[in-house]
Image: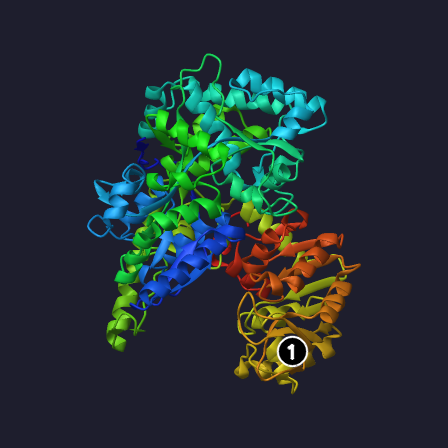
Amino acid sequence: MKFKTIAAAALAVATMLGMGACGSSTSAKDDKTITFWHNATAGDGKQYWEDMAKAFEKKTGVKVQIQAIQNEDFEGKLTTAMQDPASGPDVYMTLGGAKTKDMIDAGQAMDLTDKISDTVKKQMSSALESMSYDGKVYGVPVTVQPGGIWYSKDLFKQAGIDAAPTTFSELKTDVQKLRSAGIDPIALGGKDAWPVGHWYYWLSMRECSPKAYAKGVNDKDFSDSCWTKAGDDLKDLLDANAFNEGFLTTTAQQGASSSAGLLANHKAAMELMGTWEPGVLKDLTPDKKPMADLGFFAFPTVDGGKGEEGALMGAVTGFAVNPEAPDAAVDFVNFMAEKSNQEKYATAFSTIPASAEAYDAVTDENLKSIIEAMKKSDGMQLWMDTALGGNIGNALNSGVVNLLSGQGTSADIVKAMKPGDVTLLENTRFYKAEDGKVKKDDDKKGIHLTEEEFQAKKAELKEKRAAMAKKLASYGDVYCNDAFGTAHRAHASTAGVAAYLPAVSGLLVAKELEVMGKALDDPKRPFVAVLGGAKVSDKIAVINNLLDKADTVIIGGGMAYTFAKAQGGEIGKSLLEEDKCAYALEMIEKAKQKGVKLLLPVDTVAATEFAADAEPHVVDAMHIPADMMGMDIGPKTVELFCAATKGAGTIVWNGPMGVFEFPTFATGTKAMAKALAESGAVTIIGGGDSAAAAEQLGFADKITHISTGGGASLEFLEGKELPGVACLLDK
């Protein structure tokens, strides 16, 4: 089977939306350590990568430092980290399609054409096409992921459905049968947008002839009526009450209340997903075992549709190498491709390996049927949003969500994909002129400037920043900033553009300012602030500002150990900022003077090493043994902190209570998230790790507001003016 890759064209401009991402990563660029980013955050998949890393280290002596990032956060963090490849991961999961092409053009992916092994060339020849651009190879594939509809055989039987539908008409009939039986027919994670988009992608490929489909995706010509027919088809499903209640606020794959969780727990009968679905479902079933009655059927044909019979859509997951990575990183991606590792990958992820020679490892009958479909099909289209690229793809997904929320039409979806309406300006931080900053000394790059050279470079970059902003402004008539995550930075694409165009806030920025602004300026009381995270230095101004506004301030996480040390406590090997001890005492005294209740941990869950399998020990917060380090708040502290949230009118939370990434030490953070969810208060999470924790632990849908900006929300809580907001007319 051939894999069809489609490049995205630039989108003409009338209005611009400024977007960016926060975060950074440091990577050890030596030949004995490599860094590796992937999106398997739980279950057998996460364990697979950890085991592979150990096997690679045993074989080569090279240590692999792994960072597992939630899928919905992965793209933003990766594109931010790779703005300077020297600080990005050595090996990373590719984004696919036009997004990967953009990274290649920006010099963020290594040309592997002459570096991939013979094993990769021979066993992955078909899948390798999806990793190739302009005749060169930029990644090694690990899995082929065509999509289709996964369903519960038991629920189908309960509704009197004897066979899976093959046509769209049959699917709508089955929807009615399931509804009549009191069963939600289709689980849909509308909050994440892309699962909603997938329904439109498939319907478009079924409605449009191959020529019309290619013309749309390649040439951005959506004049054929098939594109609006696809939207009308989807609206028919909506009108048939096909989706789960609250589907627009349901996440896709995070916890039992997600769309995948609804299927895994027999709360809904179907879900449209790729071949990763069985693995995701397995981690969400009550017994953490494969869903026993899981079935699969190909996306149905549409009556009167002109699409190619049996045509597939999906993706090929692969891994690219940072251009500045050591040779060991190339060895690692070749190691992934070895037949035995591909077989293990297929088992761990319950998916189809990229290596045809590893197909025998696939035991799931549903996946076997997909393999047969792959052999019969003459190609596989990339997911539409991937093929179209971030700008158009995001606009497409938003348009489909608007259709299902009653805020748009099928015609509006087509308009969203057409050039000339809106430009989504995204991930411009890899341009040096973006922030106008220059380093006087950079040991990593061997840069050491004199004061005169430093000032000259600053002036030059300032001019380039202004020129970049002016150039961006020349494309549009109005500037709309909906990127709260970058509002704390005076970048060329944010505050810079606003110097040349009328600048207004988008709906997201407006909501951020409204919700968090009210929480700080006119909170419903009692007002409780919960602060965690690793370092006091990250929260100095936040603590100081909130002590002037809150009734109760709770301090947990790593920074609590600095407060304990400041008061004469013994904290063992716990995190400590010794230079902030005096500040901690000042804050304790300020709380007394202001009459603010300041709560600190009374007990701690400690361990002798920083590891997921470390043995936990509950100890007094002021008497942590010398050979131990604090990893989480203890049970007495959990009780104390949660009690403080009861009866609260407003709760603001920023920073986890412990190392929540390790299940053993996630208890405190989970309890805090649960307390917020059950408090009945106006609850606000200030982005970053605390937002990730709420999502990962399954409480996100019960929080009033989760900020989209970690750094921006922190500075907002500090009371600072945000440059990306100050420049707007309607802030």
Residue nearest the viewer, comparing 582 with 550: 582
Residue 558, horizontal then vertical, whole percent: 58, 72
- At x 42%, y 42%, the residue is 361
Is residue 698 something one can see in this rendering? Answer: yes
Residue nearest the viewer, comparing 362 with 634: 362
Q: Is residue 262 left or right of residue 495?
A: right
| Amino acid type, mark 1 | Met
Q: Is residue 88 above or below residue 98?
A: below
Q: Is residue 24 left or right of residue 592?
A: left
Q: Residue furthest bottom?
A: 568
SS for callout 1 = helix
Q: Which quarter of the figure has residue 491? A: bottom left
Residue 589, horizontal then vertical, whole percent: 69, 81
For the image, the number of numbered tags is: 1
Q: Residue furthest right?
A: 647
Residue 525, horizontal then vertical, whole percent: 76, 60
Residue nearest the viewer, comparing 304 with 56: 56
- At x 61%, y 17%, the residue is 173
Residue 461, horizontal then vertical, whole percent: 29, 61
Give the labeled residue for mark 1.
587
